[in-house]
């Protein structure tokens, strides 16, 4: 039946809301009620055109999508709107598209991204302005940490920067008052009072910044530890001022990208006891919390204390139960210091000599008047203006520094002590009786030949990264120099023959002659020989291990390749590589006793021995060619 004008008007208002509409009905809506009745029969008899989707609409409207049956608005769909273009519009007309573009849903969804973008830009600008001030505070906190200054300096430093009109640090009046009164406020706080909002200049802000920086640094170290194929743990125990046991842990790792070793501080924690089991348990727990299991720990570096290096209940022995491939490395600097200290302990006069140096230091330390008088004597005799140094048992070069000082101011010392002894100073008289002797003077000169040889090797061992290939070379050179002193006099001992008249018992200084107590020459020679021989023996015994596995790593430096002949190149380094592959390319077994029961710990090979040896041959040729 033919639709009335009212019905046609109603249908026209519902354009785009129906899923399907007959084309005839659409045509009637277009013509309206103005079509005469007699023309209706003619329209019915004509073919109705079928409307189809136009592909150019996709170019004109980027938000439009077509699935072959209906049109969709991607913007409205993503925004979660509900309209005909989200369920699928099959009315393929330009007017349908225009009606949708003018609709509220589409306008809102199109403007939202622009509004969000503008808001993000505004937030970025505001955040940037705020972050500038926070960056300044972070830099201040970082500087305080590097300089080792206390947290209480954070607020005064910011106040100083504000007074100097530093950019991005200008304080408001309220903030300036808070910063000025922060020390007083902090003293009243018990930790439970809420912090003032936006107070970024107090001690609490400094604590928060320090905690955040610590977390970031620890996370970076954790990532580096996990990226390294293996880890060497460096650890030492100590006691803090509150008499609590502490365990300091560092780690040496390899950067997979550069293959370069780096050392990182890991943690400093309190431990219940200083036993091997307590240290091992805490060490493994700290490494495990950072994603490092025991089978990844290939080396242990320590000061050589029995609790660290013990094969049964020491840390090294307990770690070998977890990873038998682990290498225990006794710090070469500590080891060498034991060589010198134990050599002196076995000789009575060397102990007496060290005691004289200590007594001399504390004699002058106890009185500024004595120091001033000694300086006056040094100035009169045109001697170096030096203070007597202390001998520290834990500092490698302290003995040489104290020895060198006494050697250089020996004449002013004897002069001063002689003068004070005449003024009834019993301590000065006692020190003079020990110093003004042929034996003390002779040993001072002799030790000036011996100690520098030891000190040179000590300095090499204290480098940040010691070349393991040079350890045995330096040790052999040190032993050779000491053996020469047994055969012939050194430079200072030759000078002693001129400065000391053993027949007249006179010490010839630069400004006069000083009587000294005599001593048989064979006693001096015997003390010198015993000390040097004991030194050589201790060095040879304590560094014997380095001729084996650790020294074998030195071959990887490949220094002499360019000077080797073809015949020498074939065999060079093969023995050292064999030592390394025997250890790391084979299953290792560690046997130990637990509750009187014999136990075994095994670890699988880390590398293929045959492949490593074949690669070594190719590596030599490749490095030589390049």
Image: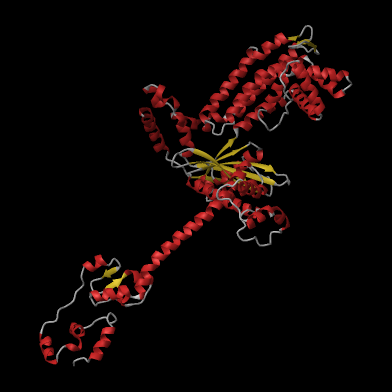
How does the figure colour the protein chain or chains?
secondary structure
Q: Residue at x 46, y 30 (%)?
A: 557
Instruction: Tell which of 506 and 542 is nearer to you.
Output: 506
| x and y percentages locating residue 165 in the rendered image | 59, 47
| x and y percentages locating residue 326 in the rendered image | 54, 41
Instruction: Tell which of 313 and 30 is nearer to you.
Output: 30
Instruction: Tell which of 67 and 438 is nearer to you.
Output: 67
Q: Quadrant of residue 484?
A: top right
Can residue 285 be seen in the rendering of this structure?
A: yes
> In this image, 548 relative to 487: left or right?
left
User: Which image quadrant: the N terminus?
Assistant: bottom left
| x and y percentages locating residue 229 in the rendered image | 47, 44
Can residue 433 be seen in the rendering of this structure?
A: no
422 up-or-down from 470: above or below:
above
> In this image, 72 relative to 394: left or right?
left
| x and y percentages locating residue 192 in the rendered image | 69, 61
Q: Residue furthest top?
A: 503
> In this image, 361 relative to 572: left or right?
right
Q: Residue at x 68, y 54 (%)?
A: 182
């Amino acid at each position: 039946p033919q639709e009335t004008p009212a019905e046609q008007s109603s249908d026209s208002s519902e354009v785009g809301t129906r899923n399907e509409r007959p084309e005839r009905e659409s045509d009637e809506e277009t013509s309206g009620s103005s079509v005469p009745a007699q023309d209706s029969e003619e329209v019915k008899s004509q073919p109705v055109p079928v409307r189809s989707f136009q592909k150019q609409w996709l170019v004109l409207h980027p938000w439009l999508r077509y699935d072959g049956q209906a049109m969709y608005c991607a913007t409205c769909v993503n925004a979660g709107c509900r309209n005909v273009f989200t369920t699928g519009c099959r009315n393929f007309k330009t007017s349908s598209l225009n009606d949708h573009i003018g609709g509220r849903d589409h306008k809102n969804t199109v403007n939202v991204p622009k509004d969000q973008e503008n808001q993000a830009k505004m937030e970025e600008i505001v955040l940037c302005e705020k972050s500038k001030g926070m960056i300044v505070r972070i830099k201040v906190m970082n500087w305080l940490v590097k300089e080792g200054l206390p947290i209480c300096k954070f607020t005064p430093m910011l106040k100083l920067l504000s007074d100097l009109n530093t950019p991005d640090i200008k304080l408001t009046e309220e903030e300036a008052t808070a910063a000025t009164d922060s020390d007083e406020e902090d003293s009243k706080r018990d930790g439970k009072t809420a912090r003032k909002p936006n107070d970024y200049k107090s001690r609490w802000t400094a604590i928060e910044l320090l905690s955040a920086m610590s977390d970031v640094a620890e996370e970076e170290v954790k990532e580096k530890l996990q990226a390294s194929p293996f880890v060497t743990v460096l650890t030492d125990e100590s006691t803090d001022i509150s008499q609590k046991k502490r365990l300091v842990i560092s780690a040496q790792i390899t950067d997979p990208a550069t293959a370069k070793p780096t050392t990182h501080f890991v943690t400093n924690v309190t431990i219940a006891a200083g036993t091997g089991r307590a240290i091992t348990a805490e060490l493994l727990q700290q490494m495990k919390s950072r994603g490092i299991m025991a089978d990844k720990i290939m080396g242990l570096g320590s000061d050589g204390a029995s609790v660290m290096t013990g094969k049964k209940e020491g840390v090294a022995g307990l770690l070998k139960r977890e990873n038998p491939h682990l290498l225990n490395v006794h710090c070469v600097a500590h080891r060498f210091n034991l060589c010198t200290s134990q050599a002196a302990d076995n000789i009575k006069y060397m102990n007496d000599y060290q005691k004289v140096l200590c007594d001399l230091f504390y004699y002058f330390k106890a009185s500024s008047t004595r120091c001033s008088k000694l300086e006056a004597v040094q100035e009169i005799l045109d001697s170096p203006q030096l203070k007597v140094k202390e001998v520290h048992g834990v500092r490698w070069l302290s003995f040489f520094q104290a020895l060198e000082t006494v050697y250089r101011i020996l004449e002013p010392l004897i002069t001063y002590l002689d003068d004070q002894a005449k003024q009834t100073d019993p301590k000065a008289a006692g020190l003079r009786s020990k110093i003004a002797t042929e034996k003390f003077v002779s040993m001072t000169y002799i030790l000036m030949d011996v100690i520098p040889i030891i000190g040179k090797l000590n300095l090499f061992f204290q480098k940040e990264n010691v070349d393991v290939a040079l350890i045995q070379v330096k040790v052999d050179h040190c032993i050779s120099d000491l053996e020469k002193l047994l055969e012939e006099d050194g430079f200072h001992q030759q000078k002693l023959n001129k400065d000391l008249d053993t027949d007249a018992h006179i010490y010839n200084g630069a400004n006069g002659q000083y009587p000294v107590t005599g001593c048989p020459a064979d006693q001096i020679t015997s003390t010198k020989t015993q000390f040097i021989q004991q030194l050589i023996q201790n060095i040879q015994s304590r560094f014997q291990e380095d001729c084996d596995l650790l020294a074998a790593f030195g071959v990887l430096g490949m220094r002499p390749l360019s000077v080797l002949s073809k015949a020498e190149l074939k065999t060079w380094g093969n023995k050292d590589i064999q030592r390394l592959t025997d250890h790391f390319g084979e299953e290792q077994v560690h046997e130990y006793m637990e509750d009187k029961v014999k136990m075994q710990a095994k670890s699988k090979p880390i590398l293929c021995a045959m492949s490593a040896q074949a690669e070594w041959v190719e590596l030599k040729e490749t490095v030589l060619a390049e």
